[in-house]
Image (tube, helix red, strand yellow):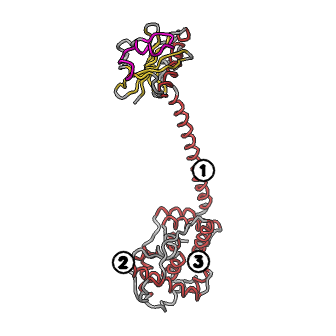
Amino acid sequence: MSGDPMMPEQHGGGDALDAQIVRHFERQRLDESSLDRLRAIASPGGVERAMAAEERKSWSGVRWLVTAVAIMLIGGFVSILVMLPEDNAGNDGRLTAGENVRLSIASEIALNHRKELGLEFPAEKDIVMDDYAALNRMMPKLDFVMVAPEPGHGTSALVGGRYCSIDGHIAAQLRLVCDQGKRQTLYQFADHADFAAMAPGEATVNGVTVTLWRQSGLIFGLAKSAG
Amino acid sequence: MLSNEFDELMQRGFRYALSLTHDRPAAEDLLQDACLRVSRRGGPWHAGYLLKAIRNGWIDGLRRGKIKTEAIDAVAEDELIEPAVDFVPPEELLGGLLGRVSARDRELLYLSAVEGYTAAEIGGLTGRPRGTILSALFRAKQKLRRLAQADLAGGGAVADGEGGVG
């Protein structure tokens, strides 16, 4: 192409418009880094280098994808770990037999706690607050006699109760007044041989903190929600 | 080829690519692809060859759907006031106006005004007859003028062609 100008505007008024179009496009310039890239392409071996760079770029994309998938998998694995009982192992990371039993009971209590089942024996009708004797009369199927927890366990006033079971043994689930917004349920059941190895203490399962202790031949479990 | 000549060629190629895309990054990509094509064949590094490579890359992109054309509100020709043929749009409006005419029109305006191609040469590059190029070029300029006049009259939403890329 020679670059001979077209007839200078047989349509009229074109010179000024053309000049303006020229000025507009002349202001559009490649920057130095873009020019460098193009110079590199035009230099000997430039195409091969550019192709290799493109390939690296596409592999880099694949690497990012692989990394992202790996992060997601690790994230999923960590989430599963978080769902498992937290901080319930000893310093060496292994649970003792007593801790195992505690964790097993705590897990069942936490499950019951999270179900938030309604009360079979609500306090407002028949039970005077903290009147365990009245509640015992309303729950005759229990194979033990419920007692008020000793002070110092952080329990609050009784709201009502229902039957439940722990490890196949009948138990009482007692709803307590919320403590600073935390829902509380108290579990009482007879201290069977199955639970003999249980080490009293605390375990956290799925965000529910369960404190277990022995009192008056019974096992007590106090469950508190995190929030 | 001297470094300065090469740089000037690249600037020309970039501007031509910009006339097709009306988008800087897309124009740079188009130019780079064209350079790869030319380089693979071992040159030659001159404008006719480079511009042809850019145009071929543009058409390939359109066919593959890599380059998208987006339709924007078109305005019936008779809705716009016919401008005087010597009316020149204000310079500050020109960039926006060029974005509102079709790629084909922008290419014509660029090749004619900036590259100084004759209608026959443009026809040779674009595969259209000389007479068609002449009338298309006249219409393209009139479109620019009409759009500018409508903008100045307060009808800034008017548009024509494929907009951003077209």
Residue A123 location (% of width, % of height): 39, 21
Q: How many marks?
A: 3
**Helix or strand or loop: what does disc 2 sit on?**
loop
Eye-nearest disc, 3 or 1: 1
**Badge number at residue B154:** 2
Magenta span covers which residues? A124-146
Eye-nearest disc, 1 or 2: 2
Which residue carries the number 3 mark?
A: B48
Q: Is A158 or A197 nearer to us in this picture?
A: A158
Find the distance from the CA under tag 1 to the CA under tag 2. 51 Å
On the same chain: label 3 and label 1?
Answer: no
Number of residues whose C-alpha sits closer than 10 Å to that of mark 1, classed few (under 14), some (14–19) or many (20 or more): few
Which residue carries the number 1 mark?
A: A59
Q: Earlier in the sequence, mark 2 or mark 3?
A: 3
Residue B148 location (% of width, % of height): 40, 80
Q: Is residue B42 above or below residue A190?
A: below
